[in-house]
Amino acid sequence: MSNTFTMIGGEGPNSYQQHSKYQGALLEAAKEKINEAISTKLDIHLTSNLVNIADFGCSTGPNTFAAVQTIVDAVEHKYQKDIEFQVFFNDSSSNDFNTLFKILPPARKYYATGVPGSFFGRVLPKNIFHVGVSSYSLHFVSKIPNEVKDRDSPVWNMDIHCTGFSKKVANLYLDQYKIDVGSFLNARAQEIVSGGLLLLLGSCLPNGVQMSDTVIGMMIDFIGSSLNEIAKQGLTDQENLKLPIYLAHADELKRIIEENRCFTTEVFEIISHAKGEYPLDPEYLTKTFKVTIGGSVASPFGQDVMEKTYELVKKKTQEMLPQIAKAEPGMQYPIVFRKI
Ligand SMILES: C[S@@+](CC[C@H](N)C(=O)[O-])C[C@H]1O[C@@H](n2cnc3c(N)ncnc32)[C@H](O)[C@@H]1O
């Protein structure tokens, strides 16, 4: 089964494009930090008046446009001269690049290029970009650990994900996550110019908090148990679906980024999400997780199973609202790296 994990494309009511406000709010909350980092930490020699920006895991918009615009404005403000901008929009080749290009902001001040390919490897030439960003995209692992998938292994996980119930399963995901973040940073280190900045934004878990006690973990569990029910009706083989996601604990993330030798860490902060935690609204919650995780349910099992699954997810979300209300809050971070 493919680990391709793309958001639901298009511009329809079930698209990522229409339901990515939660992710977008983190960019908004981190805007001041990004402006400050570009103003004080970006240290590039502009030999020509061209600045290259790259977004790794751009999806279909509109958040990628907001991230790019923030960078463009901050770079213009810093250098106070006429600069031409080139933007590389990277995502997996199964991303809906057609929608991305269709809705590019008409008044943009940059040239746009699509860069398909996995960001765990090189996707750009050496020394090409000056400022890079990756928002809500580095929660993915490149593959599900073999032992977790193997029915005969003692750590076989029949559920779709590690939500904290088995330390051994979570550790295997963590091992893979470390390898993948390392590969991501090594690839970016070759593509970015010296003195350039790489901005990472996303969610992590507070130390000691299990994923299953957070809203994200609970929603993933509802998806898993809904798929189990559908499997009992003979419609799908749920045990084959595993999500290639790992939410690191804050300390794990800190250790992983400290281990890299290519970048200095200029900012690593936990910030308050402008939207707070997820709203207690079953419709909103179901839609948000449908547009992100729905694609990976639909691709092996088909659209019908995906719709049935999410009807059940919505029902469970409704029933479990009191438990969701008591969920442990997650954490959101901006990280700013500078290339040595
Ligand atoms: C939750 S979306 C975030 C989109 C956007 N950056 C935002 O902030 O709204 C995560 C994106 O990462 C992309 N992605 C996941 N793994 C990837 C990989 N290995 N290489 C490139 N893109 C990847 C997915 O296709 C998806 O579009």
Image: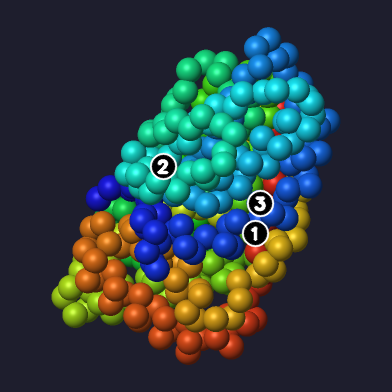
**Amino acid type, callout 3:** Leu
Assess whether mark 1 and mark 3 are in contact (beta carbons under 8 angstroms). yes
Q: Position of residue 264 (x, y in %)?
A: 73, 28
Residue receiving disc 2: 101
Category of crowding for the residue at label 3, using alpha-carbon neighbours closer than 10 angstroms: few (below 14), some (14–19), many (at least 20): many
Q: Which mark is residue 27?
A: 3
Q: Is residue 189 above or below residue 252?
A: above
Q: Earlier in the sequence, mark 3 or mark 2?
A: 3
Residue 140 visible in the current orientation: no
Q: Residue 161 sits in which quadrant?
A: bottom left
Q: Residue 326 sits in which quadrant?
A: bottom right
Residue receiving disc 1: 25
Residue 127 visible in the current orientation: yes
Q: Secondary structure beneath disc 1? A: helix
Q: Is residue 64 above or below residue 323?
A: above
Instruction: Single out the residue that lies furthest toward the front.
Output: 107
Distance between mark 2 and mark 1 Cα atoms: 22 Å
Tag count in the figure?
A: 3
Q: Secondary structure beneath disc 2? A: helix
**Amino acid type, callout 2:** Phe
From the image, state whether disc 3 or disc 2 is nearer to you: 2
